[in-house]
Image (cartoon, grey):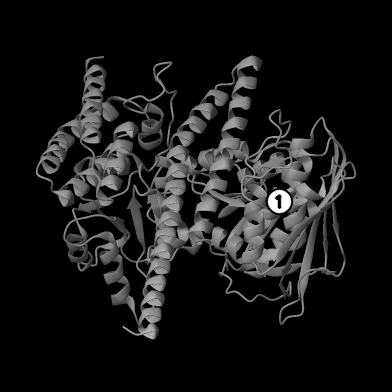
Amino acid sequence: MSDKDNKDDLAQKAIEKLQRAVAEADAMAGMKSNFLATMSHEIRTPMQSIYGLLELIADEKPDEKIASMVATAQESASGLLEILDDILDVAKMDADKMEMDVFEVPVRTLVRGILEALAVKVHGVDIELKDDIEKDVPFVIIGDPKRLRQIIMNLAGNAMKFTEKGSVTVRVTKKIKSIKPVETGLALRFEVIDTGIGMSHEVCDKLFKSFVQADNSTARQYGGTGLGLSISKKLVELMSGAIGVESKEGKGSTFWFEIPVVEVSTDTTTLDLPSLDGISVLSVEDHPQGAKEIVKSLRSMGANVESCPTYKEGLELVKRRPFDVGVIDQGLPDGLGLDLIKEIMEARPFMGLIMYTVRDDVGLSHSLQSLGVTYLTKPASRAGLGEAVQNAAKKSVRINTDGPTRLLIAEDTDSVRDVLQRQLEKIGVDADLVYNGKEALAALETGKYGILITDLHMPEVDGYELVETIRKKEEGTDNHFPVMVLTADVQMAQREVYLRHGFDECLLKPVSLGQFRQLLFRWGLLTEESSAAKETVPEASDPAGETAPAIDKNAMIEQMGAFDDSAIEMLGLFIEMTEPLVERLQKALDSNDGHDLKESAHSLKGGARSASCNVLGDLAAQLQDDTEAGKPSDGLVEQIVQEFKRVKSEVKKLKAA
């Protein structure tokens, strides 16, 4: 072999070795991202239950000592959820799955809304929060409002942490120093200026790396994960911008970032806006500029809007005349928006409701979800706000209420079908149930139905194929048949995911009565005249001290309206229907039948969660995930068997009581 051949051979081997190393590094990065995402999700799931229980305790109006402990626990839970969000962002960025949204961003509303949200943290502290937005800064730009908010919130929150007294100022200017404007010739510089303790040059140089903190001593005075600034840097870079910090010890700090932007005229839009013609909206917003922008935005889309600044005036207006939709702020001068929403639901049970707030609060979001109310964080784009109003309004539904309005449900799990039938009886809606997509398509051919709710995983024809078939038949026509997805898969709760598949809305199992009623009303299957059914929620009676009950009675009350004889009867039927499924799990594991094991675990997951047996449902979900990953566990199946026995025992006690 010649020297040239030897060199070529060595070069080829070196390339192959490098390719293997790159592949191994990619695989390791993927494993890390999957681990972080899974860990974040698995911790978040029980945290939702913790939030719900804390909320129930607070609603009982406990004495001052208990209320103080509940508030502390809620604050700690909120802090943990913020950390989980950071971890999930890191996982997405490492996997190159972080995508920027493109919406209109009202710059002044964004900045002032963030300062309003942070204001609750400076009570009793000698810190002034200020904004300084130069006059020539555009009112509206194109960008990702959620990610811009996240960056500014991270920087401002960090500044407050290291500032004992003085001020934190958010400044916005067109005077850029570190990037070149894009073709539009426009870029913005955001600065967060504090009068805090400042930092050395050495700390500044490494501050934007993951898990690095300005205060790294073993006796740290300032908390945090060290992820916020690293995430902010990556987000700014995704926006083709630059980020940095200028600081002197004892003299305060200025964190800054610059991004190229596109200006949008406040009288025009680059996006298609929804039509709100004929929709009447009540806006309850106490901030004058914010109220003005809501009214102007919604009127530009055709809505009839009335605005007021207080809880009292809002409630009086609702009682005086009906509105299609209410857009309610949380922080009102004379009360909480959540309490106003609950009163409005009593006075006008068929009114669409939106919480529009600067608070990015998981607990509040959870409360509103259980009521079937939309949660929208300020500032939303005009399109985002208009879409939320359109979805909440009874006059905006695409279903033809002059035609058939009967409901069709495709669901293959018997226990879930039983829960749905009982809920529909309480609500007063006529519906037919089929077992799979094939039967659903045949039923739709009869022309009897005006709306479809379907599970995703079903035999013969699943939910994906079902909605795809419906949408293909509609091609070239003006028809649009409403199809809602019903799923226990948490990731499908992301709106953009199910819309991409052709669904109109997503219902996440288990579905509360409030969510169910609001959806059916929104799509024209319920009217004020046709249904006088109201959801009644008596006090829960979970035994004290049981942190993970076999049956979550609070969840059952949300679904069924009460934990009564009918609910206990339903649980008895769940046991009868599920026993063969649990036996099938064991047989599938023994025979190494991965497909049947996965399908059985999926059915058990949906059935258990719909029966409010959440521990059993979570175990089944884990088994489904493990089987899909090719690593089903004997021990996990045994845990499911034992948990099912615990559920059976609890149901037996309830029947005997």
Q: Which one is nearer the viewer's eye here, 161 or 574?
A: 161
State the image quarter where residue 504 is shown.
bottom left
Q: Say which residue label 1 marks.
A: 206
For this orientation, the residue located farthest to the front is: 2
Q: Say if 634 sits above or below 210 in the image.
A: above
Residue 70 seen in the current view: yes
> In the picture provided, is 368 more to the left or to the right than 493?
right
Q: Which one is nearer the viewer's eye here, 557 or 15?
A: 15
* Residue 347 image offset from top left, x and y in percent: 55, 40
> Image quadrant for the N terminus?
bottom left
* Residue 418 image offset from top left, x and y in percent: 23, 40
Q: Counting other residues with Cα less than 10 Å from the Cα at mark 1, is it few (<14), some (14-19), or many (20 or more)?
A: few
Q: Say if 425 sits above or below 137 in the image.
A: above
Q: Label 1 amino acid?
A: Lys
> Image quadrant for the C terminus?
top left
* Residue 487 image offset from top left, x and y in percent: 33, 50
Residue shown at the point (63%, 26%) measured from the top left: 71
Residue shown at the point (54%, 46%) measured from the top left: 87
Secondary structure of the residue carrying tag 1 is helix
How many discs appear?
1
State the image quarter where residue 453 is shown.
bottom left
Q: Say if 558 sits above or below 524 in the image.
A: above
Residue 357 seen in the current view: no
* Residue 272 image offset from top left, x and y in percent: 57, 74
> In the picture provided, is 445 more to the left or to the right than 333?
left
